[in-house]
Image (cartoon, helix red, strand yellow):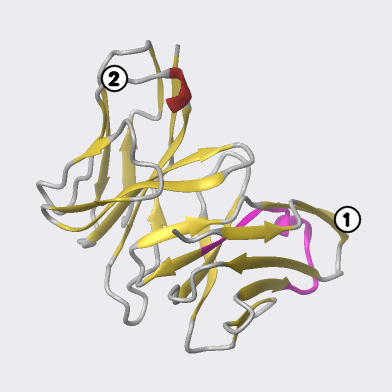
Amino acid sequence: GENVEQHPSTLSVQEGDSAVIKCTYSDSASNYFPWYKQELGKRPQLIIDIRSNVGEKKDQRIAVTLNKTAKHFSLHITETQPEDSAVYFCAASLMGNQFYFGTGTSLTVIP
Amino acid sequence: EAQVTQNPRYLITVTGKKLTVTCSQNMNHEYMSWYRQDPGLGLRQIYYSMNVEVTDKGDVPEGYKVSRKEKRNFPLILESPSPNQTSLYFCASSLGGTSGRGETQYFGPGTRLLVL
């Protein structure tokens, strides 16, 4: 089956700096790549996603890039704020049925 | 209010005592799924359902059963729970399909299970 690896496992940045989280996947058939944010004690919530026919997608301070050839995708958060502190999960899916998640990145934004 | 609900939210049980965690959604979603979340392992998919009476195994189905008799409900059944099933469980639903926002999953609040 699919294998998704996520790095780093923890990340600390100063408020206002950028944060980048990277994921790799193994199954070239995967075609949907969502990113979820999970605050402490809360449920995961989708923050951005990308499909395999697109190389980059941006939503305000958040962007995701996908390199299908290298089988990796990344989450970029610019102008980080303390409320961005959370655990972020990447995932890979084929047709939105089976989902394989990374192990998570704990992001801390230092005021 | 559009939502996914789970019950119970917290459960302590003993090895071997059958239990059911319910999941319900009011968004008329076709797709529903169960995940377990363990420290350092992220979320792992247990079972998913693409529609009524259609279910399939995820990555870690051993020790679990599901059923999808109605569109809105997708219960998770542990016939004989064991301590290694102690975990945080999330149900999720989505419209289904691959067009537009079909794959966007909405998660329930989670059920924290402790098996002694």
Q: Position of residue A95 (x, y in %)?
A: 35, 72
Q: Nearer the viewer, residue B37 or B72?
A: B37
Q: Nearer the viewer, residue B107 or B18?
A: B18
Image position of A52 with respect to B79: above or below:
below
- Does residue B10 appear to the left or right of B39 in the view shown? left
| Residue hosting label 1 | A111
**Residue at mark 2:** B80
In the image, what residue type sits under mark 1? Pro
Tell me the magenta residue range: A77-91
Would residue A16 appear left or right of A107 to someone viewing this image?
A: right
Query: At 10% from the left edge and 46% from the top edge, which residue is drawn?
Result: B69
Residue at 32% x, 73% y is: B102
Number of other residues with Cα within 10 Å of mark 2, as a class: few under 14, some 14 to 19, many 20 or more: some
**Can you say whether B75 is above or below B97 in the image?**
above
Image location (x, y in percent) of residue B94:
32, 63
In the rendered image, which quarter contains the C terminus of chain B? top left
Residue at (32%, 77%) from the top-left corner? B98
